[in-house]
Image (spheres, rainbow, N blue to C red):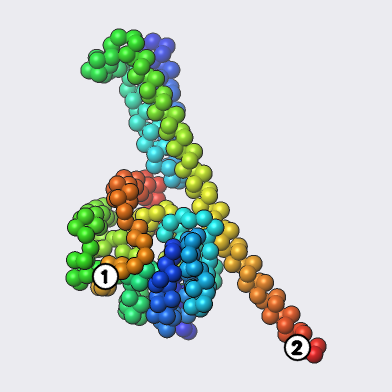
Amino acid sequence: MKLKLMALIPAYNEEETIATVLSGVRKHVDKMVVVDDASTDSTAELAKKGGAVVLSHVINRGVGAALRTGYRYGIEKDFDYIVQIDADGQHDPTYIPELLKTAKQGYDIVSGSRFLNKSFEDYSALRRVGILFFTKLIKVLSGLNITDVTSGFRLYRVKGLKKLSRSQDKHWAVEQTFEAVKKGFKIKEVSVEMPTRQSGESQFNPNTFFWYPIRMIEIILQVLIFRRSG
Amino acid sequence: MRGINIIGFLVGVYLLVRSYLLVKKREEDVLNFLIWLIVGSGLIITGLSPGVFNYIMKVLGMEERPYTMFAVGILVLYLLLFRLVSSMRRIESENSKLNEEITLLKEKVNSLDLEVRRKNKGKEGRTV
């Protein structure tokens, strides 16, 4: 029996890159789903033209919220795997077969890591330090041997995804990884080149940098206190 | 133990029970949990040994009544602020859930609409 794979692409004002991303993803998956997080440009129209199912949020709620909507769609439509990929072109769709192949070896989550190759060197020192700090923290708290806890290029086995709690609207990656480890998920990383984005609006601004550590600490406490082990 | 200490102790126990219930019911509110836990523990400690409270006030330089009232006033303002932040977060979370529901319902309506149109087209074709 052929296993069904859905591509989940959260997008906010990505009209410059969405068509290219979709044309790259199309050949690797059975269905493409773009969750448009209330974009003010023509992202949704371009995604429809590109052959994707477009789920349009009424209000902008952040990447975590867009992913949640996409996961629910994937679960309701009985897909076996979901691969999530950024709409800004940072994630190269040619890695999808490798992620899928690894997942079929029995992993619940396969995550692309930019720290298993040299592509992390393009990132600013502050961002690198932030990612490494939280990766180390998760490593210490959960014992998971991981190099890039904030990576958004992930492939999930839907059966596993169903067991995860509702994640936050923003900064979902650390929360999801930590909870997944607590619930006994099998997680594997694959080396993926992720150059910095060339166009569009980055989610990393001074405001994000200020709030990020506070939100992360809150999220870690939330998983530690409220989420039960699986 | 004076009456005020007993009241403080009981309120402290109530707040600790509230924080425990948050965990039991898995209501994921870290801010609420931490505030109830810290305030509750503080009230129990000062209720059981009032000397601790006097000592803290002395360290903070607030033995005199006007200073104490000022400090209590600020504390009350903080608690009010905390209540507001809590309500705002709850509303944001509900907003987010509604957003998700509306999005998925819209998609279901669109696909049903498409299916109906396709069926109608098929019927028309057969009639012609």
Horizontal and vertical percent for residue A20?
Answer: 40, 77
Asked if one can make out residue A81 in the rendered structure from this viewpoint, the answer is no
- Occupied quadrant, residue A188: bottom left
Secondary structure under the numbered disc 1 in the rendered image? loop
Callout 1 amino acid: Pro
Q: Chain of mark 1?
A: A
Q: Quadrant of the C terminus of chain A?
A: bottom left
> What residue do we see at 71% from left, 80% from top?
B119
> For this view, does A128 lie left or right of residue A84?
left
Q: Which residue is labeled 1 in the image? A: A195
Q: For label 1, count other residues whose C-alpha is less than 10 Å away and answer few (under 14), some (14-19) or many (20+).
A: some
Horizontal and vertical percent for residue A142?
Answer: 27, 55
> What residue do we see at 56% from left, 61% from top?
B103
Task: In the displayed orientation, state which residue is furthest to the right.
Answer: B127
Secondary structure under the numbered disc 2 in the rendered image? helix
Q: Which residue is labeled 2 in the image? A: B125
Horizontal and vertical percent for residue A17?
Answer: 39, 72
Callout 2 amino acid: Gly
